[in-house]
Image (cartoon, helix red, strand yellow):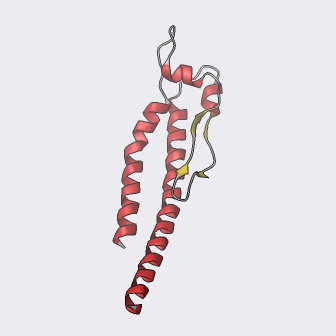
Amino acid sequence: MAQQISSLEFLSAEMKAAGQKAIALAKVVLKKTAIDIERNAKAIAPVDTGNLKNSIGHSDMRLLSETNLAIEIGPTANYGQYVELGTSTQAPQAYMGPSLDRFGAPFEQAMAQIGAEVLGG
């Protein structure tokens, strides 16, 4: 019985370490993806005065729970959503959506690799 408990304790410790490793790697991937999306959005944002382009940025990373991370990416210019989505008198000039689309698949692939690495050992 003592051997079974020892094995369970070892497995529990291994799982906790794997989770911590996964979170550390996920933070790197999330930060890089946020920078990539920000850079791309700035490159394709329509420019009139440059205010919209210059207002595009990303927030600091937040830990929402033990396993959930978040970063917000977008403009602080109050009219950014109107440019992105358009209005009744102005056609959309998307810059955030295409940037997210461009880096969404590589982000998912990197996260899958983290999972495979952590679970595979």
Q: In the visual, does 120 lie left or right of 55?
A: left
The C terminus - image quarter: bottom left
For image coordinates 50% across by 61% down, the residue present is 23
Residue 38 position, x and y percent, is 54, 39
Q: Residue at x 46, y 36 (%)?
A: 99
Between 96 and 6, the one nearer to me in the picture: 6
Is 97 located above or below residue 11 in the figure? above
Above or below 97: residue 119: below
Query: Foreground: 16 or 113?
Result: 16
Q: Quadrant of the N terminus?
A: bottom left
Image-quadrant location for residue 81: top right
Indicate the position of residue 57 as horizontal and vertical percent values. Answer: 61, 39
Q: Provide residue 116's location: percent of width, then percent of height.
A: 35, 64
Corner quadrant of residue 73:
top right
Residue 31's place in the image compared with 21, above or below, is above
Q: Where is residue 102 in the image (x, y as percent from the top left)?
A: 40, 39
